[in-house]
């Protein structure tokens, strides 16, 4: 064998070894990346369910808040308060005789 063939053979052996090492590192990295993607996809599904539940609670709270605001407006109305006092407490004006119908 000539020295030129031997030098080329050892050089290509080194290149092949480095390429195999690079390929191994890339396979390990890509495996890790796929694993992380899979785990994050599962977490996103869980978070989506939590988000829907939180949105439902927010909508319920908003509806309740609007109902309470409407009740506040009604309770600031003098006629509504008088009506409540007559119906629920049996109250009336002085000299007025309340009638109970059963």
Image (cartoon, rainbow, N blue to C red):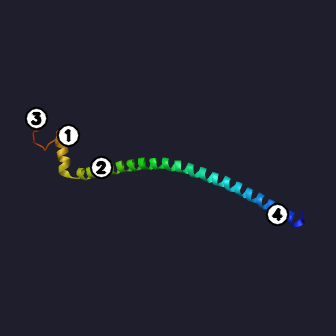
Q: Count the marks: how many?
A: 4
Front of the two marks 2 and 4: 4
In the image, taking residue 14 as reference, residue 58 lies left or right, namely left
The residue that label 3 is drawn on is 101
Contact check, label 3 and label 2, Cβ < 8 Å: no
The residue that label 1 is drawn on is 88
The residue that label 2 is drawn on is 68
C-alpha gap between disc 3 and disc 2: 32 Å
Secondary element at tag 1: helix
Residue at the outermost front position: 1
C-alpha gap between disc 2 and disc 4: 83 Å
Q: Quadrant of the N terminus?
A: bottom right
C-alpha gap between disc 1 and disc 3: 14 Å
In the picture shown, does residue 71 fall above or below 3?
A: above
Q: Which mark is residue 75?
A: none
In the picture shown, does residue 101 fall above or below 25?
A: above
Front of the two marks 1 and 2: 2
Q: Residue at x 82, y 63 (%)?
A: 11
Q: Earlier in the sequence, mark 1 or mark 2?
A: 2
Task: Characterize the local packing of mark 1: few (<14), some (14-19) or many (20 or more) Cα atoms within 10 angstroms.
Answer: few
Q: Residue at x 19, y 39 (%)?
A: 89
Front of the two marks 3 and 2: 2
Contact check, label 4 and label 1, Cβ < 8 Å: no
Q: Residue at x 18, y 47 (%)?
A: 82
Contact check, label 2 and label 4, Cβ < 8 Å: no
Q: Quadrant of residue 90?
A: top left
Rendered location of residue 21, percent (x, y)? 74, 56
Q: Earlier in the sequence, mark 2 or mark 4?
A: 4
């Amino acid at each position: 064998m000539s020295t030129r063939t031997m030098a080329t053979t050892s050089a290509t052996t080194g290149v092949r070894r480095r390429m195999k090492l690079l390929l191994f590192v890339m396979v390990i990295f890509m495996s890790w990346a796929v694993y992380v993607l899979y785990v994050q996809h599962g977490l996103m599904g869980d978070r989506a369910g939590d988000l829907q539940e939180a949105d439902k609670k927010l909508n319920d709270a908003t509806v309740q808040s609007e109902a309470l605001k409407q009740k506040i407006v009604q309770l600031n109305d003098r006629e509504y308060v008088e009506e409540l006092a007559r119906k629920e407490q049996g109250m009336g004006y002085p000299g007025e005789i309340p009638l109970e119908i059963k």
